[in-house]
């Protein structure tokens, strides 16, 4: 098989469920692969971490790569990423320096993972150093849209066990799969293209018929059968199109 996945430690077991050779370090010697063999393979970067570097500590990229390191580095800087895809899709209003009186804002660090370091604060206040603040969109309609080489499918986040929260961080909720509208499909692919990602997922809110994109994820959860099958099929189709064996 000509597909290999590089991922982060916390995503290793999940990524391995796709059924392709997968590693945190990019060391596949136990599977008969030497470092020079990588240029003969389609390398898919699934997440970030030390995967950008080779054994000599130098920045490394591959001849044939999906989700290049440049794209993942940009996506890891959440403020810069949002400002980048915000040029092609709708995003919540971003505040600079201070949040005005009476405005409810979401405050998060420039770099964060999953639902960590999440605060909802009412202005006026100065935005803390190392953080960004954006308008809190009051809606219960949050979607995740999985994308892969021009394909998309969507799930609306729903509370597990029938529970609900006040102004929740909605990560780790379940999904009710939904039809992807043409607008949602094209918006998601436009956001992914702006960052440079081929595979991943977009998180967004929907209010008043408008899509508000929050962030992209280059190592989305694939613990459920539906997204796992989606990526398996898309990766194989992508590899075949590029002339690799699957």
Image (cartoon, rainbow, N blue to C red):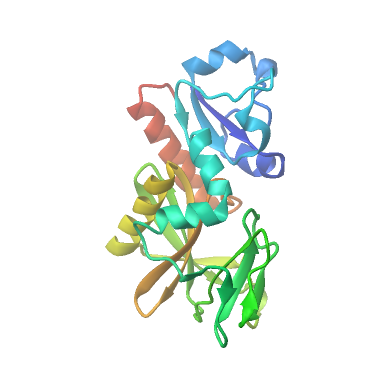
From this viewpoint, which residue is outermost toward the bottom?
102
Camera-side residue: 95 or 40?
A: 95
* 73 to 84, vertically: above or below: above
Q: Classify residue 30 by image quadrant.
A: top right
Q: Is residue 12 above or below residue 245?
A: below
Horizontal side of 219 relative to 68 (left or right) equals: right
Viewed as shown, does residue 146 lie left or right of 87?
right
Q: How many marks?
A: 0
In the image, 206 versus 174, the foreground residue is: 206
Residue 126 vertical position relative to residue 42 in the rendered view, above or below: below
Does residue 172 appear in the picture of this structure?
no
Residue 32, x across and y down, in percent? 64, 13
Q: Position of residue 54 (x, y in %)?
A: 64, 21
Question: Depth check: 104 or 61 in front?
Answer: 104
Name the side, left or right, on which 165 lies relative to 203. right
**As drawn, which residue projects farthest toward the left?**
182
Say above or below: 44 vs 212: above
Residue drawn at x 67%, y 21% is 27
Q: Tell me if residue 111 can be seen.
A: yes
- Figure quadrant of the C terminus: top left
Q: Residue at x 54, y 35 (%)?
A: 45
Q: Position of residue 225 (x, y in %)?
A: 54, 51
Q: Position of residue 88 (x, y in %)?
A: 34, 57
């Amino acid at each position: 098989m000509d597909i290999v996945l590089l991922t982060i430690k916390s995503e290793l077991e999940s990524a391995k469920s796709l059924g392709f050779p997968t590693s945190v370090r990019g060391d596949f010697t136990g599977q008969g692969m030497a470092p020079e063999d990588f240029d003969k393979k389609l390398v898919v970067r699934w997440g970030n971490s030390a995967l950008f570097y080779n054994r000599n500590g130098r920045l490394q990229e591959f001849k044939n790569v999906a989700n290049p390191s440049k794209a993942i580095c940009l996506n890891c800087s959440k403020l810069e990423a949002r400002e980048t895809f915000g040029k092609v899709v709708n995003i919540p209003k971003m505040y600079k320096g201070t949040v005005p009186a009476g405005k409810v804002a979401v405050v998060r660090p420039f770099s964060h993972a999953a639902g960590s370091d999440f605060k909802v604060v009412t202005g006026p206040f100065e935005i803390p150093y190392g953080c960004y603040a954006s308008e809190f969109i009051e809606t219960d309609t949050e979607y995740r849209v999985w994308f892969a080489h021009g394909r998309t499918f969507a799930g609306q986040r729903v509370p597990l066990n029938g529970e609900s929260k006040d102004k929740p961080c909605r990560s780790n909720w379940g999904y009710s799969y939904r039809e992807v509208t043409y607008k949602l499909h094209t918006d998601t692919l436009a956001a992914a293209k702006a960052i440079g990602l081929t595979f991943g997922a977009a998180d967004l809110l929907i209010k008043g018929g408008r899509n508000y994109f929050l962030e992209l994820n280059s190592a989305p959860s694939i613990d459920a059968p539906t997204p796992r099958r989606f990526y398996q099929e898309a990766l194989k189709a992508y590899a075949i199109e590029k002339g690799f064996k699957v």
